[in-house]
Image: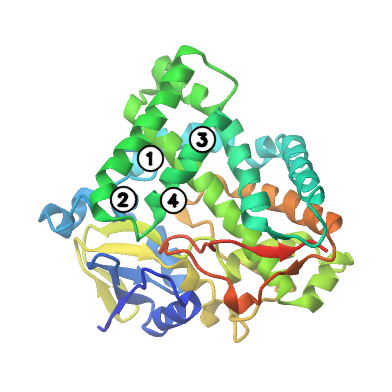
Amino acid sequence: MTRIALDPFVADLDGESAALRAAGPLAEVELPGGVHCYAVTHHAAARQLLTDSRVVKDINVWGAWQRGEIPMDWPLIGLANPGRSMLTVDGADHRRLRTLVAQALTVKRVERLRAGIEALTTASLDRLAALPKGEKVDLKAEFAYPLPMNVISELMGVDGADHPRLKELFEKFFSTQTPPQEVPQMMADLGTLFTKIVDAKRAEPGDDLTSALIAASEDGDHLTNEEIVNTLQLIIAAGHETTISLIVNAVVALQTHPEQRKQVLSGELPWENVIEETLRWNTPTSHVLIRFATEDLTVGDKVLPKGEALIVSFGALGRDEEQYGPTAGEFDATRSPNRHIAFGHGPHVCPGAALSRLEAGVALPALYERFPELELAVPASELRNKPIVTQNDLFDLPVELG
């Protein structure tokens, strides 16, 4: 099996994803830093493996980890070994840690956040409208980033004063370009910051999910302080990064497909279609780390060996022709059905999917209603990917508001 090295600079994600798909449903890959693993790259195989109880989150199953081959200064160590939370356990422990989060993020409860999301969106658009006419604007920094960060922070009870430090640390956390000597300190700083937030909520509880997790631990649900801190970090990280990319990628898709943009703005196509097709065609999450095989598993005509690591290559499987037909590589907001799994599948499916969809469903129509003449300020070919192998993320999104 030919090994495919994932580009740490993400110069051509589409080309890389195509190569992964061509390698078959199970591809042998090398992560930045020379770490070997396997990737599932076809839709059907991903659904199979993500519901297979023999594929687990326990890093101690990983042979390379057991043998001491994974250095603690590996730039992706925080994603491979983020500490004990619902992301890293299975079975009963996973259900225990996930229950409170899932209950807080049901579709019905998330819908109650709509008014607040609309208010934040309006405030952001007002700031954009106040800028001088003709000025280029980084839509990612000025619009796509503040909304989900403010929403998830309010949900979790995180003070806005912590946002700059969180942004700085998460930039290092996700980047493959973080110098190895800085990785241990970055991980320690994240732990310190989230521990401070939990301690503050323990002293002065509020109407937020962090306070609810603390209360549950005191009422007999047996969440440890480590589990609470790590759960907070997980939700903040996943709860804003995915939605930023979803908003940015949807704007790029519409700007590069003017006929479909026209259909959406005229009401001929619903915004929901744009969001779902963006999630499939230009998924916010390119690769998700990491799972481990407890025994040899057959995937197509290949084998995922016992003790090996598995990543899910959402960027590849989102354009799988076996699932979506010969037009899988095209953006088509009329596509129906569109049964993608951009938010995962099985027990570890993202509990924040409804919130992300709601934020994008509020932000995108409001943006285009306010600025229907919005245009990219540079050709789409000049938009730059950030060096993050897990997030399909751009450095910026320069636009002219019109």
Give the x, y percent position of residue 215: 47, 18
Left or right side of 142 for 84: left
The nearer-to-camera label among 1 and 4 is: 4
The nearer-to-camera label among 4 and 3 is: 4
Give the x, y percent position of residue 397: 63, 63
Q: CA distance from mark 1 to mark 4?
A: 27 Å
| Mark 1 Cα-neighbour bin, 10 Å: few <14, some 14–19, many ≥20 | some
* Mark sitting earlier along the chain (4/2): 2
Q: Residue at x 66, y 64 (%)?
A: 398
Q: Secondary structure at mark 1?
A: helix
Q: CA distance from mark 2 to mark 3?
A: 18 Å
Give the x, y percent position of residue 292: 27, 58
Of 43 and 121, the residue lying toward us: 121
* Mark sitting earlier along the chain (1/2): 2
Q: Which mark is residue 280?
A: none
Q: Which residue is mark 2?
A: 57
Give amino acid for label 3.
Answer: Val
Q: Which residue is mark 3?
A: 101
Q: CA distance from mark 4 to mark 2?
A: 24 Å
| Mark 2 Cα-neighbour bin, 10 Å: few <14, some 14–19, many ≥20 | many
- Contact, CB < 8 Å: mark 2 with mark 3? no
Q: Which residue is mark 1?
A: 94
Q: CA distance from mark 3 to mark 1?
A: 11 Å
Q: Residue at x 66, y 38 (%)?
A: 110
Q: Secondary structure at mark 4?
A: helix
24 over 240 or under it: above or below: below
Q: Secondary structure at mark 2?
A: loop
Left or right side of 119 for 204: left
